Amino acid sequence: MLRDLTDAIERLAPRDIHYAHDARWGDLNGYSHVRASMLGPSLVVPFSDGKLLLGTWQQIVLIDFDNRPRKREIILRVMGD
């Protein structure tokens, strides 16, 4: 499954084509901005009795599309009664 997702993302926003972002900023990671915008920056998952309510085959995956290592911060917000 993971390989299928990687391949699909590469087809939708390939690394090796021109992005206007690259011409403006020169950092050659325009593809990473396009990919991140397709998936979005956040996720909402319901939970009950202290457990995430995921389907049998579901999991949460963090994907960083950038072309170089960067410091990242993950924020977890729990809401409910």
Image: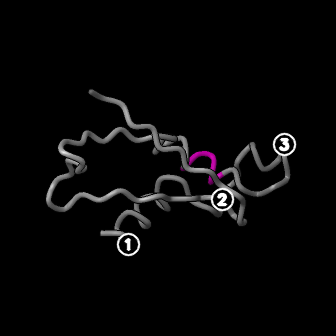
Residue furthest bottom in the image = 3
Using the image, tell me which numbered label, if any, was put on residue 66. Answer: 2
The answer to which image quadrant residue 7 occupies is bottom left
Q: CA–CA distance between discs 1 and 2?
A: 18 Å
Numbered badge on residue 27: none
20 left or right, relative to 7 = right
Image point 19% across, 62% down: which residue? Answer: 57
Residue pictured at 16% horizontal, 53% vertical = 55
Q: Position of residue 73 (x, y in %)?
A: 62, 51
**Badge count:** 3
Q: In terms of secondary structure, where does tag 3 sit?
A: helix
Q: Position of residue 20 (x, y in %)?
A: 74, 43
On the image, the x and y values in percent for residue 46 come to: 25, 39
Q: Amino acid at mark 2?
A: Asp
The residue shown at (65%, 59%) is 66
User: Which kind of residue does numbered mark 3 sit on?
Assistant: Arg
Crowd class of label 1 (few under 14; some 14 to 19; many from 20; radius 10 Å):
few
37 over 60 or under it: above or below: above
Q: CA distance from mark 2 to mark 3?
A: 17 Å
Q: Residues within 10 Å of mark 3 (few under 14, many from 20)?
A: few
The image quarter containing residue 49 is: top left
Q: Quadrant of the N terminus?
A: bottom left
Q: Are marks 1 and 2 in contact (CB under 8 Å)?
A: no
Magenta range is 31-35
Task: Using the image as rendered, state which of residue 10 and residue 17 is in the foreground.
Answer: 10
Magenta stretch: dominant secondary structure:
helix
Indicate which label's residue lies in the foreground, 1 or 2.
Answer: 2
Q: Which residue is mark 3?
A: 24
Q: Secondary structure at mark 2?
A: loop
Q: Which residue is mark 1?
A: 3
Name the residue nearer the viewer: 72 or 10.
Answer: 72
